[in-house]
Every structure is written in structure tokens, then in C-alpha cells.
Amino acid sequence: MSNTGKKSYKTLEESQITLSELMVPVHSNFGGKIHGGYILGLMDQVAFACASRHSGNYCVTASVNKVDFLHPVEVGELLILKASINYTGNTSMVVGVRVESENIQTGKINHCNSSYFTMVAKDEKGLNVPVPGIVITDNQGIRRFVRSVKRQEQTKLRANTFDESKFDASQYIELLRNHNVQINL
């Protein structure tokens, strides 16, 4: 934001980050696969870099939405992480992170993971600060922005539905009968 209070906007390309790293044995488990926690750490780094580039401020991770490891990453593969701003609020941003692995001998690329990091911009005192909006230029950008809005709405609904002070377990007992659970009340 400028001193005049006029809102600023950035294109997605101005904030996008790509990180590539060769996967080495030090980050693997006994089966030769790269630890998911190590990959998650790289995802957080690239989300931080993207959000910080977009906002021009230090950013913190507020939440991570849905991390599904779709394909194992092998030692010796190149891991490519692509981060882009999907949504901007007043002080927060949703950064979409796509993770791919590339077999550097065959060139085969596998989609390993896509996830969404909510990042909040902070000033030097640790207070939330406004972030620029984004310029959307295609249907894909609209889809990503709306998906983030809908995800926020679903999160609020889920939080309200399962608020401990309002939750009535008796309404869900029948649902649980079809699951791998024993209920001893």
C-alpha cells in the first residue's frame, strides 16, 4: 500500500518462485525414499519466499491445507517446487505449491504433491501488514482464487460444526457404526 492509501496489485509472475534441489541420501529413509517431512520443509521455504516476494515483508505460515504425498521421491531425483499466489486477503495470502520429481536419467516427471499454505505478512514489530492484491488474467487464476475463498468458508463451517462447546455426539453415533471404531460410553 502506498502512503495515499491506494491499493496496489501485483501479477502472479512477479511473485512466483521455483526451487529445484537434487535429492541426496542424507534426506532418505531406509527404503531409499525421501522423508515427507523434509519435502514439507522445502514446501514451507518456497511458500515463504513467494509470499515474502509478493508482500515485500517477512511472512509467517498460518496454516497448511491438505498435504497428500501422491508419489514417492527417490534419492537421485531432482525435486522441483513451484509456488504461486492463489489468493490475497488483507494481510494474508494463499500460496499454492506444486511439487514434482524428475528422474534426471529418463526425464520422467511425476506430480508428487500440491498443497496450499496460508501466509501472513508481518512488519518489523511482528504486526500484520496489508498485502498487495493480485492481478488475475485467466480462468485458471479465477478458479484458484475462488477455490481459496470456498476452502476458507468450509474451514469456518467445519470449525463451527465441531466446536467442543456446541458438539452433540449423540447426533453422530449412528454414523460411526459404519467405521472401524468401538464405542464404549
Image (spheres, grey):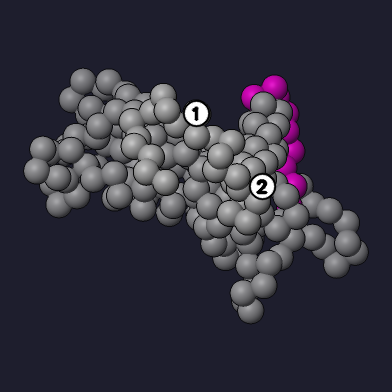
Can residue 18 be seen by looking at this rendering? yes
The amino acid type of the residue labelled 1 equals Leu
Q: What is the crowding at mark 1: few (fewer than 14 residues within 10 Å), some, or many (at least 20)? A: few
Residue at the image point whose x is 88% and y is 56% from the top: 6
Can residue 99 be seen by looking at this rendering? no
Element carrying mark 1? helix
Tell me if 114 is positioned left or right of 76 in this view.
Answer: right
Element carrying mark 2? helix
Quarter of the N terminus within the rendering: bottom right
Residue 6 vs residue 164, the one in the foreground: 164
> As drawn, which residue projects farthest toward the left?
30
Tell me if 41 is positioned left or right of 116 in this view.
Answer: left
**Count of numbered circles on the image:** 2
> As drawn, which residue projects farthest toward the front?
185
Q: Which residue is mark 1?
A: 175
The amino acid type of the residue labelled 2 equals Asn
Whether residue 114 appears in magenta in the rendering, the answer is: no
Please tell me which of labels 1 and 2 falls first in the chain.
2
Using the image, determine if residue 162 lies above or below residue 109: below
Q: Position of residue 106 (x, y in %)?
A: 21, 20
Residue 76: image quadrant is top left
Q: Which residue is mark 2?
A: 160
Q: Position of residue 21 (x, y in %)?
A: 30, 44
Q: What is the crowding at mark 2: few (fewer than 14 residues within 10 Å), some, or many (at least 20)? A: few
Using the image, determine if residue 138 lies above or below residue 49: above
Residue at the image point whose x is 55% and y is 43% from the top: 169
Residue at the image point whose x is 44% and y is 52% from the top: 44
Tell me the distance, in whole angstroms, between the alpha carbons under discs 1 and 2.
19 Å
Residue 168: image quadrant is top right
> As drawn, which residue projects farthest toward the bottom?
125
The magenta span reads 132-141
